[in-house]
Each structure stands twice: as C-alpha cells, then as structure tokens.
Amino acid sequence: MNGNMMHLPLTIPSLLAFAASRHRDTEVVSCHSGGRHRRSYGEVWGRVNRLAKALLELGVRRGDRVGTIAYNDSRHFELYYAVPSIGAVCHTINPRLDPENLRYVVAHADDRLLFVDARLLDAVLGALPDYPLQRLIALEDAAQPARPATLRYEDLLTAQSDAALNIAIGEEEASGLCYTSGTTGRPKGVLYSHRSTVLFALAMCSANSTAVSALDAVLPAVPMFHVNAWGMPHAAPMAGAKLVLPGADLSGRHLATLFNEEQVSLAIGVPTIWNGLLEHLGGSGDRLPAGIRLGVGGSALPRKMIDAFEGMHGATMIHGWGMTETSPTGAAGIAHHASRALPVEDLRTLRETQGHALWGIDLRLVDDDSGEVAADGKTAGHLQVRGHWVANAYFNEPQHDAFRDGWFDTGDIATIDERGFLTLTDRAKDIIKSGGEWISSVALENIAQTHPAITEAAVIAVPHPKWQERPLLIAVRAQSSEITEAELLGHFDDKVPSWWRPDAVMFATALPRNGNGKVIKSQLRERFAAEPILQRSIVDSTGGWFREDYPDQQIWATG
Ligand code: ADP
C-alpha cells in the first residue's frame, strides 16, 4: 500500500525559486569585471528567467549540453539555474584544460553553446578554431567593446523579460555534466540529475556535514567549473544563505578580505587554498571572522592545518571525502556524540580521518578478488560506494570497469573502523608495493608534513631490483630551512616500521599540481622512475629537483 503523500519532483530551479520568494533580499555577491557586485536572490531569479528565454531563442532544446568556461561569479551562477530550468544540461569546463583535452570534452559533450569568460575567449578561440562563432557567448558587460561575431551575455538578457517560464522538469532528467580531471587516460563525464543535485544540496545543509543555513554567508573557494563547487551554489539558495562568489582570485589576501568584509561564516576549499590563506594571515596579521567554518576536501587535511586554523585563528575545520563521481561528498569528518568523551589526542586523530559516511551513501571495502574485507580500522581494501548522488555510469561510455554490481569502485584504498570512520590510505595506483607488502604513500607524506621544516611532500614508488618498488620522498622546504636528507629521514624513526622509511629524499622548490591543486604524481613518476634513485645522483637547484649531497651535478632540466 502506498502512502497518501504528495509527490513533487526534486528540481534545481525550485531551489532558486524558493530563495527568490522566501529570502528575496538575501544577497549574491560576485567578484567580476574588476569589481564587487551585489544582487538579491529576487533580482538574480529575474535574470535567470531572462537567460532561460534567451537560451530557447538560441535553439537550445531539452537534453542539449551548454558549456561554460568560467570562474566563480554571478553569471556562472545564473547559468547553473537557467540551463537546467529548460531541461538542458550545464556542462562546466575547466578553463585550465590543455587545448587537446578542451577539444576532446567539447566534442565528446557535443556542446550546443559555449559561455566563456571574456578573459579566456582568445585562448578558447585558439584551441577551438572550428567552433562556430555564433555559438560562443562572451561573459562580459554590455559596455565592453563587442568582439566580432561573438554574442555578449548581457545583450542576451537585455532583450528578455523577468517572468518565469515554469517548464515542467522530471527529477531524473540530466541537469549538469562535469568531466573528471583525467590524470589517468581521457577525461570521463559524470552526468548529474536534478534529483541527485537536490538531494546532495540537502546533504550539505545537514549538520553532519557543512550545515548550511539561513544564518550563513557561504563562500565556495572551490571552482564552479568542478563538481558544482561541491554543491554550494545549490545548497545556499536551498537554505536561504548569502552567497559570496570570489571570481578568479582565490589568493589568501583576496579570501581574507572577502571573509571579513562580507562576514563569511562558511567557506570550502582544497588544502592548497587554505595553505595560501594561512600564509597570508601569518604575513599580514589579518584575522578571520569569529567562528568561521572551513570545509576541506580533495586531498587529506593535514593535522598541522587543523592546529593552525583552530588553535591560532578560532576556525572550525570540516574534513570531507569525495570525488567527481560522488557529487562530490560521500563522507564528512564530524565527531560523534560518544567521541566527545575521548582524550584530546584521540579526538585529534579522529578529526584527521576522512569522516563518516553521510546518510544516502553506502561504503564498503573489498580485496583484489572483490571479497568484502572487515571494517576493523586496520584492514585496507578497495573503497567502493553507492548512493543517491553517486554516478552509475560515465556519460556516453556505458561500459566501464569501475561500475559493477551496483557499486562504484573509487580507486581509493581505505580502512573503515568499527564506528564507521573512513581513513584513506592511498590511491590504488599510488600505493607502494615493496616485496609484496603495501606501503601507504599518504601515511609517509603525512609524517613528512608534520616536520616544521617541510611545507609540501609527495611519496612515489620507484622501481627497485630486489623489492620491486621502494618509496621516494619529494619534499619542499619551508622558507629559510636547510634541513638535510638525513635529518628528514630521521623524522620517520619510531613512526613507521623501518622498512616503510623512504629510501631517499629529493628536495623541490614546488610540487607539480593540477588545476584542482592535486599533486600530479604521474609527472613525478615519469621524472624519477627512469633513474635508479638509489645511485644518489640527482641535482637541479635552479627551480627543479635537487639532491643536496651532489649540489653541482645537474641531471634534469626544470621542464
Ligand atoms: P576532485 O577533482 O573533486 O578532487 P577527483 O574525482 O578528481 O575529484 O578526485 C577524487 C579523489 O581525491 C578521491 O578519490 C581521493 O583519492 C581524493 N580525495 C578526495 N577527498 C580526499 C580527502 N579528504 N582526503 C584524501 N584524499 C581525498
């Protein structure tokens, strides 16, 4: 017997329609065109309706993909709502993609239109010389001089009225498309639905994750071109929170200014962004608004960062785990009621885990033969996931090994303890297999990063004639530090079994990172795997890698 309850589709336009009616004067603040602009949710909703009509006039139909190559600003936000409001799919594209991958994703998605930040237009035209100009729309002010043949965003809006279209949308229809970073192989598309997006936004409003509410001013310092800026552009209107969009400048100085002037109470970003903020705070003496919450994910949250933000700046850190295929958040690091009684040191350790699965997400660990392994906090396995905001296939690529038996194989290696806390120990492809045993690169990186003289660290496997693979540590020294290889290796004593200790240290001036701030380990492997590291002979002190015991022997150019 069914219940007698109404069934209304969970759709993306309903989020902004709600904010425009119940939180009409709450602001969307946006940094673009060289200034800071503010509009109310009511005004933004009117502009979204204008844009939706313009899209229809430009020939966009249900299911069509509309590409955006843009930063975190209000025009991008308007596209987030206008495109799905007519049943089309908002395909957010990373502006930092190299030309080949840009051509690949635009062709694979078959983007009907491309909305491009004016600053990126020349690069996009260069990379896509055959893309029809009349399907390119420049995100710029009407006052700016028109470029030949490309349309201008503000002109499109001027020609329309504010009234809503109210097109009926099914909750399972596609709404958004985001390609994975493609660090291995071609980028793969994840096609979100209205329903998955709304349920995910609801999860972000839960107090077990980021707890977005009408009391908040929310600043996403993760890009809107990647995984919907972790759902904040949807969660903020759902909750009636003020939204602060920082534009392209995510420097510590700019974020600190916005935090204080806009009274931001919740911001989310990857650890690299928060490192930049810490550096700025240290150098400038600026303070953070009292009680600010900082969400962190994408890579592990180092203890040093928790201590710095919570101990010195009065912030609260919220650690989450996820990926493009999981919208992204699957787990978040909120301690349990029972864990309040833990000794401080145990609680700190718990805070470093990737947290606890949110409602709506199931996690399990399996071994190489797909047999489930114990969630005992010790046994590591391949992390698999399923849930309301988890993909069940890649876009236009139905056959993929990662999706099997109703589960998605994340490519992460993890443990889960008896209380359900998730700890990532590695990416399956990054783990070091030494003499048939596994060494966690992440565990070694974390230890290296606890040394005050080290700011960044990456551990990779290098081939070894006897052990198959051994760990090599690549580290970046803090300014003015002269720590030696032997001193840094000594830091591992008593912290890991002796055979886990890296065989050598390379010092670097910076680690190669992709557009999302992740270390590109494949690049490090390419550089180092070919050379038998154990011959101790690598130097390049001119901005690349160097071994300090051979300061004048240069082997690799900086590249
Ligand atoms: P994104 O580009 O959003 O970071 P990707 O899908 O490219 O998403 O990468 C997801 C991967 O990032 C995860 O599979 C995991 O390896 C890593 N990751 C995400 N969050 C964390 C975290 N909190 N701690 C450690 N690794 C993380």
Image (cartoon, rainbow, N blue to C red):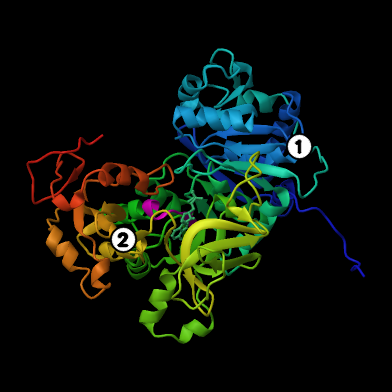
Task: Give left or right: position of 283 versus 180.
Answer: left
Q: Residue at x 66, y 61 (%)?
A: 387
Q: Which mark is residue 86?
A: 1
Q: Looking at the image, is mark 2 or mark 1 earlier in the sequence? A: 1
Residue type for callout 1: Ile
451 to 114, vertically: above or below: below
Residue 277 image point, x, y percent:
35, 53
Determine if residue 516 is in view: yes
Neighbours of disc 1 within 10 Å: few (<14), some (14-19), many (20+):
many
Rendered-image quadrant of the N terminus: bottom right
174 to 356, vertically: above or below: above
Determine if residue 23 is in view: no
Residue type for callout 2: Glu
Q: In the rendered structure, which segment of residues is drawn in magenta?
A: 267-273
- Contact, CB < 8 Å: mark 2 with mark 1? no
206 to 377, vertically: above or below: above
Q: Determine whether the residue tagged by mark 2 lies in a helix, strand or loop.
A: helix
Magenta span contains residue 271: yes
Nearest to the observer: residue 300 or residue 399: 399
Residue behind mark 2: 445
Write down the quadrant of residue 458 in the picture: bottom left
Write down the quadrant of residue 306 in the picture: bottom left
Residue 220 image point, x, y percent:
51, 50
Residue 285 image point, x, y percent:
28, 57
Nearest to the observer: residue 303 or residue 402: 402
